[in-house]
């Protein structure tokens, strides 16, 4: 993130399973200045940060980043450099970023899809560029306000599309009103073209319905977490309007969606092969003895690093075989881990479920920390030190922990430590003064 003083900041979030409650938690680890944004540079900064926190790389069981090439690169990315040191530090690409990149692929798959979002932005721009035209919009459209398209947050684009989809007639009237009242001929031409051509076009009307449904689902998820070659003019002429729209627009988007989802989420298939038998108790119970032992063997191999093992195949197999016979089907991995902690008789199963719950699925917690950073480090605080910035960020992000702090005890401890330091320095000062006085007296005597 570029900040007020034109410096890049790297945010980190630590994910772990708390020993007492057996609940997976995310905790902010602060921000660091980054001068080198290559994979090696970011790895060095991250490595030094973990070392300063007293964390051993060999203890890492999961790592997750956004989908930048310097982070996810298979040869020079940060994740590859950690895997070279510790093969058990499983890398997970952020699910939300992968979904957004899939949407980018869908939007860029053909000219008609690109033109659709260009039209959405032009409708907003023609009103937003003038307070007079914006007032015309407010007079004609009483419901939702037009919003600009976001270039990074795809889940927010649903609001831009929604405002036009649900108020198309009113917006069309506002455009005609701009055409009649505006003195600028260029603006008149654009307003008339948008009202008559774009908003009255069959493909735009169908496309806005399709994209609204897609973006609505993406927005819902994010809040919860072969293309056809039809370039022949003669063939297009033989297709009806409906068939042409289906072949040249709809199928393009569907094919690109399937291809992008397959490519960008292929990493999760690898996790399915390793951790899949632990996702639900129903699935665990569906395995026969041979299949369960095979899964345990693959799991042990995945958690092996040279001669170091996290679990034992035979012991894990026996524990899971016993466990699946008396636990209810409806509970998930978190509830299973809590039960195992209470019973405290299944050490390999406990480690297995802790590793499963430690692996990150998204990096949204770290992304949210940058929202706080924007509030804390404005242009008015551009000279704030890194230590003070991290302190303020920690208070803002981990506010629930900060509220549980006993302020009186904290102040008393602070005052006690300061009093000890003052007394110690005062004693040293008196002692040095006495020595100096003795030396002066000796010189005077001589």
Image: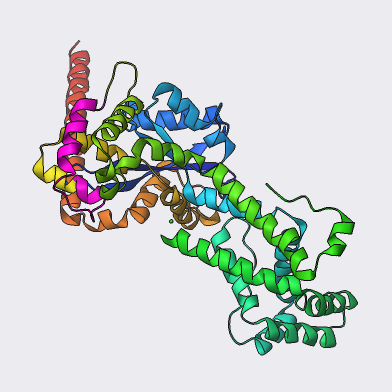
- State the image coordinates of residue 52 (x, y, percent, origin top left): 35, 30
- State the image coordinates of residue 317 (x, y, percent, origin top left): 21, 32
Give the extent of the magenta segment: 310-337
Q: Quick check: 7 above or below 224?
A: above
In the image, 385 versus 357, the foreground residue is 357
Give the left or right position of residue 189, taking residue 304 as reference. Answer: right
In the image, 391 versus 361, the foreground residue is 361
- State the image coordinates of residue 39 (x, y, percent, origin top left): 55, 30
Q: Quick check: 148 above or below 32?
A: below
Q: Is residue 92 visible?
A: no
Q: Quadrant of residue 156?
A: bottom right
Residue drawn where x is 60% and y is 45% of the image: 6
In the image, 344 versus 40, the foreground residue is 344
Residue drawn where x is 72% and y is 76% of the image: 127
Residue drawn where x is 65% and y is 76% of the image: 164
In the image, 234 versus 440, the foreground residue is 234
- State the image coordinates of residue 440 (x, y, percent, origin top left): 22, 19
Q: Quadrant of residue 140?
A: bottom right
Count the marks: how many? 0
Q: Is residue 175 visible?
A: yes
For the view shown, which residue lies furthest in the top direction?
Answer: 446
Give the left or right position of residue 234, taking residue 82 as reference. Answer: right
The quadrant of the image that shows the C terminus is top left
Residue 164 belongs to the span the image colors magenta: no
Give the left or right position of residue 385, taking residue 407 as reference. Answer: right
């Amino acid at each position: 993130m570029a900040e007020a003083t034109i410096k890049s900041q790297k945010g980190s979030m630590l994910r772990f399973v708390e020993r007492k409650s057996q609940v997976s938690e995310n905790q902010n680890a602060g921000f660091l200045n980054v001068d080198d944004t290559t994979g090696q540079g970011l790895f060095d900064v991250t490595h030094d940060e973990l070392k300063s926190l007293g964390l051993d790389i060999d203890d890492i069981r999961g790592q997750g980043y956004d989908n930048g090439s310097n982070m996810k690169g298979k040869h020079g990315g940060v994740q590859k450099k950690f895997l070279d040191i510790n093969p058990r530090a499983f890398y997970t690409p952020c699910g939300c970023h992968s979904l957004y990149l899939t949407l980018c692929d869908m939007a860029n798959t053909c000219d008609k899809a690109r033109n659709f979002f260009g039209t959405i932005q032009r409708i907003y721009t023609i009103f937003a560029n003038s307070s007079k035209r914006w007032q015309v919009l407010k007079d004609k459209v009483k419901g939702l306000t037009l919003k600009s398209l976001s270039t990074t947050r795809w889940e927010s684009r649903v609001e831009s599309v929604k405002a036009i989809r649900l108020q198309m007639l009113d917006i069309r009237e506002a455009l005609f009103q701009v055409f009649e009242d505006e003195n600028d001929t260029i603006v008149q031409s654009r307003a008339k073209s948008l009202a008559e051509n774009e908003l009255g076009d069959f493909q735009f009307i169908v496309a806005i319905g399709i994209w609204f449904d897609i973006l609505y689902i993406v927005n819902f998820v994010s809040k919860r977490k072969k293309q056809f070659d039809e370039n022949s003019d003669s063939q297009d002429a033989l297709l009806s309007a409906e068939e042409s729209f289906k072949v040249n627009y709809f199928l393009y988007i569907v094919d690109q969606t399937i291809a992008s989802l397959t490519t960008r989420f292929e990493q999760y298939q690898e996790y399915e092969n390793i951790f899949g038998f632990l996702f639900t108790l129903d699935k665990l119970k569906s395995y026969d003895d041979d299949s369960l032992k095979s899964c345990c063997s693959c799991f042990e191999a995945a958690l092996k690093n040279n001669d170091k093992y996290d679990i034992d195949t035979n012991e894990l197999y026996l524990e899971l075989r016993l466990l699946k016979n008396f636990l209810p089907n409806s509970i998930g991995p978190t509830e299973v881990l809590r039960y195992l902690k209470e019973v405290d008789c299944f050490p390999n199963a406990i480690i297995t479920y802790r590793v499963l719950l430690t692996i990150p699925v998204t990096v949204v917690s770290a992304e949210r920390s940058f929202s706080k950073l924007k509030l804390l480090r404005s242009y008015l605080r551009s000279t704030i030190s890194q230590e003070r910035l991290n302190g303020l960020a920690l208070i803002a992000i981990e506010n629930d922990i900060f509220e549980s702090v006993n302020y009186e005890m904290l102040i008393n401890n602070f005052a006690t430590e300061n009093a000890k330091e003052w007394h110690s320095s005062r004693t040293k000062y008196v002692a040095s003064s006495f020595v100096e006085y003795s030396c002066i007296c000796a010189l005077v005597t001589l």
